[in-house]
Amino acid sequence: MGQLVVKLLKEDQHLKAMSWLNWMSKQGESSAKTTELKRAIDPLEGPLFSLFWQPSLGIAPQRMELAGWVLKATGGLDKAGFARVEKLGRSLPKEMKPKYNYAMSLLYGRSENYRKATEYARKVYKSLPLSPNARMVLYASLVDAGSYRQAERMAKKALASDASDTLAQEQLASLATAQGQFEKAENLLKGLLSRGNKSSLILNNLAWVSLLRGQVDSQSVRYAEQANALSQGQSADEMHTLAALYAEQGKSAEALELLKKRLDLRNAQEPENIDYYLIGRVMENLELYDLAKKAYLKVLPESGKRKDSTYHLTQRRLRSLPDSSI
């Protein structure tokens, strides 16, 4: 979709580009009111492309193109794509800069350029220090870059000011998971849950940790299902977690159905890196071990130091295959 919008704008077909962006906006109408309420607290809430584009804007080529690039960049941008987006960003009005910096941090993170992701995250956090999303994107970029001490100091500083700071506690749990301290992470997350913090993030992370520990059970699946329900099926990451847990329990049809929905949500024609884990796990369930191995080998390592990635799960599955030569 994003590629089509960018193409139409290059051809000066602004009305057609706008109609497609309007169509994308309508897909999220059920959660639009919720997003509007959340943006009153945090201006960075909502689908990323909608930070630049809303139907009420009318024809606004620069912001339409930025929204198009964001939609196009579900798997990251190439060098030329980043150059174009950065050129567009330089002429944005001052009030749009925090949203732009936030988007750029996420896009560079998806492309595994964690230095640039952190650079932009620091800018948005400086502009919006009270924004939970600004804080989360800075924290995530530090963890992805392997700057664990900085990330820990950031979370502990927040807790020193407010011991009940849920976001800081979530961040410490995320840090433990990234470092492979899965039992510690699970205890921190369950502590948050027991105190009434039932967010989709906490539930999803609890489900993912159970998979990393090799201890998936019916409760783990319920966590993942609840996370997807809370996010109204609009989170590709949470959908991936649930699909992985279904595959782990031998529910291959359910896993593949979620994979299809995930592709639709990302407006993608082909699976991305982590999707091949799901395909491999389903092939393994069907005892098609050669096909499972081929799929698993398509899951490439991330450039960061995290120990909670799909790649680490994939390596474990490869080692368990019959006659595995890993």
Image (spheres, grey):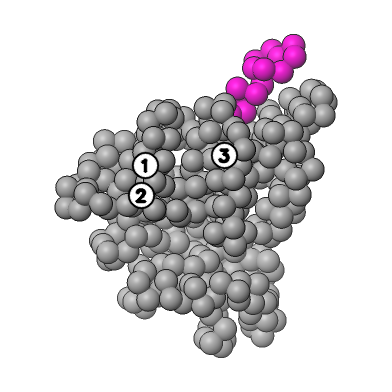
Q: Which residues are magenta?
A: 313-326
Residue at screen point 45% across, 53% down? 198
Could you tell me which residue is drawn at 41 percent across and 41 percent down? 190
Q: Are marks 1 and 2 in contact (CB under 8 Å)?
A: yes
* Quadrant of residue 256 within the rendered picture: top right
Specify the amino acid type for callout 2. Answer: Arg
Q: Nearer the viewer, residue 64 or 260?
A: 260
Amino acid at pointer 3? Ser
Query: Which mark, residue 220?
Result: 3
Q: Amino acid at mark 1?
A: Gly
Instruction: Say whether residue 292 is left or right of residue 68.
Output: right
- Image-based side of 3 in relation to 312, left or right: right
Q: CA distance from mark 3 to mark 2?
A: 18 Å
Give the mark toward the camera: 3 or 2: 2
Measured as percent of width and height from the top left, residue 307 is found at 46, 30
- Where's residue 234, x and y in %? 60, 60
Viewer-closest of 135 and 60: 135
| Image quadrant where one finds the C terminus | top right
Residue at left offset 57%, top offset 39%: 220
* Residue 172 at x, y percent in the picture: 33, 41
From mark 3 to mark 1, how far is it between C-alphas? Answer: 15 Å
Marker count (numbered): 3
- Which residue is drawn at the image coordinates 41% and 47% (left, top)? 193
Residue 207, x across and y down, in percent: 54, 40
Count neighbours of disc 1 (C-alpha within 10 A) and say few if under 14, some if 14 to 19, many if 20 or more: few
| Callout 1: SS | helix
* Sooner in the amino-acid sequence: mark 3 or mark 2: 2
At mark 3, the secondary structure is helix
> Can residue 273 be seen from the camera position used here?
no
Which residue is the site of mark 1?
Answer: 191
User: Which disc number belongs to residue 195?
Assistant: 2
On whether residue 308 falls in the magenta region, the answer is no
